[in-house]
Image (cartoon, rainbow, N blue to C red):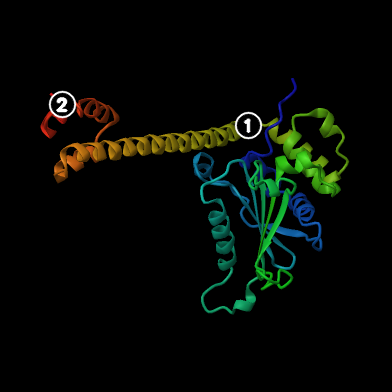
Amino acid sequence: MKTDLLNPCNDYVFKRLFATSPTLLADLINAVRSDEPAIEVVEVLNPRIDPEELAGKFIVLDLLAQDADGRRYNIEMQVRRHNAWSARSAYYLARTLTAQLNSGEDYQSIKPVIGIHLLDFELFDAPDQKLQALWCFEMRDRKRSDILLGNELQLNIIELPKADRLGVTQASLAAWVTLFEHWQEENKMAAIAHPPVKLALDHLKDLSADANTRRLAFVRERALHDEVSELRAEREKGEIEGMIKGESMLLERLIVKRFGSLPDDVRTRLRTATADQLEAWAERIFDSCTLAEIFNDH
């Protein structure tokens, strides 16, 4: 029986694909940074995936790799857009940089840190950003962008859906994009000629055929769905609370206009009321002669 392939954009599956395959990881890094000298990954520093990480929400399973010159690479596959996305990305990249330095060591021992973030969504969606899918952020002067402060920090971002839609001219990167966006389409997978991606596809097939890996991938997928549900619930809760607050403020202004300034206890009742209470009080405002009549809920 044919086994359906696991989604390589699931960050658990993504990490399993590359954690034990430094050669494949190096090819992906070199494809994203094709304008830089090619590197060789000598070690994945965090190959382990702890069970609590799989079920943990608001966690991204990243890869931390080191090349032959000691540079470190933080590689992430992300399927959802976090709040404060840029702040989170900058924080983890900076933390990877500072983690290299032990007390008393010289700053010259610090090696550059390069972030590689593969996004299965579009981050930059303004009209003037829709024709670019690959981004590289560095510390440069605002007026003289040709002046680089240093090479200690760099963040590379590729928006996979946009890259797939626009097309990628660099052959190896185009092959990786095809794998991440079209892993279920046999005709497109069969057309891939780039050997590392073909090897990654074989590895993905092996992972997909393993029952325990499929179970853990499902655990991770469920945690991500739960996260989205929680974020949606929080957003809806915030919208409802905002609506109630607006109704409370409007009712307070109407009551002040009719009865004059309000005592503190009435203001407190208005600001802590439920939507049903506000509606009931609003219906009484024009038929009541006193504040007591408005707020008499018995």
**Residue at (63% x, 31% y) in the render:** 214
- Residue marked by disc 1: 214
Of labels 1 and 2, earlier in sequence is 1
* Element marked by disc 1: helix
**Lateral position of residue 293 relative to residue 230, left or right:** left
Q: Residue furthest top?
A: 1
Give how far across and how far down residue 217 sits, in percent: 60, 35
Give how far across and how far down residue 267 sits, in percent: 20, 42
In the displayed structure, would residue 175 be above or below residue 283?
below
* Element marked by disc 2: loop
Q: Which mark is residue 189?
A: none
Could you say which is closer to the camera, residue 22 or residue 94?
94
In the displayed structure, would residue 20 be above or below residue 273?
below
Could you say which is closer to the camera, residue 20 or residue 218?
218
**Lateral position of residue 192 relative to residue 207, left or right:** right
- The quarter in which the C terminus is drawn is top left
- The quarter in which the N terminus is drawn is top right
Residue 200 visible somewhere in the drawing: no
**Residue at (84% x, 29% y) in the render:** 187
Give how far across and how far down residue 197 sits, in percent: 80, 43
- Mark 2, Cα crowd under 10 Å, few <14 / some 14-19 / many 20+, is few
When asked about the image quadrant of residue 147, the answer is bottom right
**Lateral position of residue 67 relative to residue 278, left or right:** right
Q: Residue 297 carries which label?
A: 2
In the displayed structure, would residue 87 be above or below residue 187?
below
